[in-house]
């Protein structure tokens, strides 16, 4: 009779091992699913950050190009006639340029008959014939970015 009890005990310990293995398997699945969820979350954040960084860098480059474009338009027009330029690039970037002319007295801006609003008088000859440009580039397209991306640049250029 003692042998039968021994055999029964051995079979009970095997059942306990099978139950423990199932608990270990469930724990392993929970740990692996947590790691995969974290990986997926980091991947989507990285893709969004990459897109936002690309759009921001494009805005910086467009602001430099917009300054050159504004200087070209100023050179083609009469003195002090252009005070604001607005345009859109690739239907994504809204670019706005506010222009303030810097001259010493007498200036070409006062020859227009009325005092110009976009004219600033200085006394130093080094800054005579300059232009102050405030350039803003804004991206508000919801299909590209989830939040508004804007870049502002102030530049002083010689005419």
Image: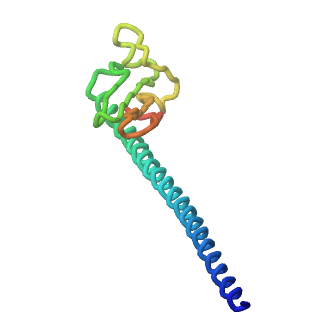
Classify 68 as above or below 46: above
Residue 17 seen: yes
Viewer-proximal residue among 75 and 150: 150
Give the residue furthest to the right. Answer: 2
* Position of residue 8 measured from the top left corner of the image (x, y, whole percent): 66, 83
* Position of residue 108 measured from the top left corner of the image (x, y, whole percent): 36, 19
Viewer-proximal residue among 112 and 82: 82
Classify 140 as above or below 23: above
Classify 60 as above or below 15: above
Q: How is the image coloured?
A: rainbow
Viewer-proximal residue among 156 and 48: 48
Give the residue furthest to the top. Answer: 114
Q: Is residue 12 left or right of residue 56?
A: right
Q: Quadrant of residue 18?
A: bottom right
Viewer-proximal residue among 22 and 154: 22
> Residue at 57% across / 70% down in the picture?
22
| Quarter of the picture holding the N terminus | bottom right
Give the residue furthest to the front. Answer: 1
| Quarter of the picture holding the C terminus | top left
Q: Is residue 21 left or right of residue 120?
A: right
* Position of residue 28 measured from the top left corner of the image (x, y, whole percent): 57, 67
> Residue at 69% across / 83% down in the picture?
9
Residue 150 seen: no
* Position of residue 136 measured from the top left corner of the image (x, y, whole percent): 43, 32
> Residue at 63% across / 77% down in the picture?
17
> Residue at 56% across / 61% down in the picture?
30
């Amino acid at each position: 009779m003692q042998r039968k009890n021994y055999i029964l005990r051995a079979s009970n310990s095997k059942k306990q091992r099978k139950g423990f293995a199932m608990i270990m398997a469930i724990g392993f699945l929970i740990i692996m699913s947590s790691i995969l969820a974290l990986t997926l979350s980091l991947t989507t954040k990285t893709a969004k950050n990459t897109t936002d960084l690309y759009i921001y860098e494009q805005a910086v480059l467009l602001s430099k190009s917009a300054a050159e474009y504004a200087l070209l338009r100023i050179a083609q027009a009469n003195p002090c006639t252009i005070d604001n330029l607005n345009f859109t690039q690739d239907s994504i970037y809204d670019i706005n340029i506010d222009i303030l002319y810097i001259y010493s007295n007498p200036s070409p801006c006062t020859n227009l008959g009325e005092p110009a609003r976009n004219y600033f008088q200085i006394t130093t000859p080094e800054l005579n014939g300059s232009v102050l440009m405030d350039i803003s580039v804004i991206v508000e397209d919801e299909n590209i970015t989830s939040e508004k991306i804007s870049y502002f640049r102030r530049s002083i250029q010689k005419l």
